[in-house]
Image (spheres, grey):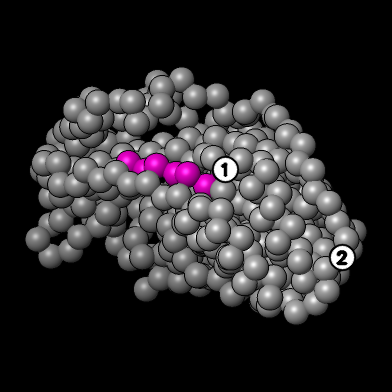
Amino acid sequence: MISKDLIQEVILKALSTGGDFAEVFIEDTTRGSLSMINGKIENAVSGRDYGIGIRIFKGLRCIYVYTNNSERISLLDTAGKAAAALDGVRIGKTVILKEKVYDNISPILIIPSSVDIMKKADKLRIAYKAAKDYSNEIKQVIVSLGDVEQNIAISNSEGLYVEDRRIRTRFVVNAVASDGKENQTGSESPGKSRGFEIFDHIDIEKLGREASRVAVTMLHAPLCPSGRMAVAIDNGFGGVIFHEACGHALEATSVAKGNSVFSGKLGEKIASDKVTAIDDGTIPNEWGSLTVDDEGNPTKENILIENGILKGYMIDKLNGRRMNMEATGSSRRQSYKFAPTSRMTNTYIAPGNDENDAIIASIQDGLYAKKMGGGSVNPVTGEFNFSVLEGYLIKKGKVDTPVRGATLIGKGSEILMNIDMVGKKLDLAAGMCGSVSGSIAANVGQPMLRVSEITVGGR
């Protein structure tokens, strides 16, 4: 991308006013997206982003600048302007970059940009037909395919030089059912760190039918009653509650500044004995996986909670300084336009020992949250509010009437204590996560679990 000699010059320029650490992040990313609405291709877009981010530390101070001009004069000028913000005296330092090479944990078979657009469109048509033909109440179907190839190089004043190539593909089906008075939606959106070969691992006709099934089912469902009750939350995207209400509070981004309910609680019991929570960026070909993080460190399996005990946080380099703790391969950013910070990768509650049937049978009067939607959370308090896209009442230990309009309301620290059954089958589901370093690909997951009591919002 840029010669190592020039990178070394830029790093030394960044350190010219007394900085004790400097980093150069170089990115070259291509994106493609294709969408079909009601059987017609509406958008076919491709683009390329290229740029360089320069970061400087002096103690706990951090300066970050970026540019898309890779000419030597421009890069040295940008680094000099960043260094000027520190207004100090240079500490004598030499930088010799030594390249580190890691085997890519997510091998790619078919580069998406090499695939003809008509071949991609054929996949959209198959899913569209399956969704549209499900019922005459399906009034609109939107299918989209997105892919991204990100090539990066990370260098720093400690001598690190590492390159990485990240390719991700995501397929989305949205179906809208209507009876002329009300509309309900269903959605399926698998994503992987794979190329076009993702279609060897997903059944797009099944995805289309499933999106429409949810839309039609919820169209005819009565409104959910409200109150405190036991809730069974299904696997896969059900893990979004832990991700939002608890996961962000375990990132050093908030922990290091004391803005987390879990700050200073290492070794303490913060969840029921049933709960073991893990963030693992090393799972091959998963949506949130990375060979190295955005500071160039190999990703790891980080055990956050083990049998209810808080074991660790997700830590980046700068917040590691604040906490006097080592980085955990958890530093991420959307692009060169963002300074990195600690973020999740593939975050999930580990499998337990309970059978799904036993979880349902244990609830006499409650809610089965089969599919979760989005929501909001206060990262400082952990208070959350999440929608249930597909829900059913449970009566006398059996799944009963479908209901719509349900929400789950609570506090992350409380829900962790109220998880009293955890199933055996773990599923992961793809999502996009937003925070101070932008929007990134992140997996959520869990087995089916039971929350003994939570506030359900409804009618």
The amino acid type of the residue labelled 1 equals: Ile
Identified at 29% across, 62% down, the residue is: 222
> How many numbered badges does the structure rendering display?
2
Q: Name the quadrant of the C terminus.
A: bottom left
Between 352 and 30, the one nearer to me in the picture: 30
Magenta region, residue range: 27-32
- In the depicted structure, whether residue 244 falls above or below residue 155: below
**Label 2 neighbourhood size at 10 Å, few (<14), some (14-19), many (20+)?**
few
Q: Position of residue 356 (x, y in %)?
A: 58, 38
Tell me: 50 left or right of 127: right
Residue named by callout 2: 91
Q: Is residue 252 magenta?
A: no
**Which of the two labelled residues, at mark 1 and mark 2, occupies the earlier sequence position?**
1
Identified at 41% across, 26% down, the residue is: 111
Identified at 56% across, 48% down, the residue is: 26
- In the depicted structure, whether residue 220 falls above or below residue 98: below
Residue named by callout 1: 2
Magenta portion: prevailing SS class: strand
Between 438 and 369, the one nearer to me in the picture: 438
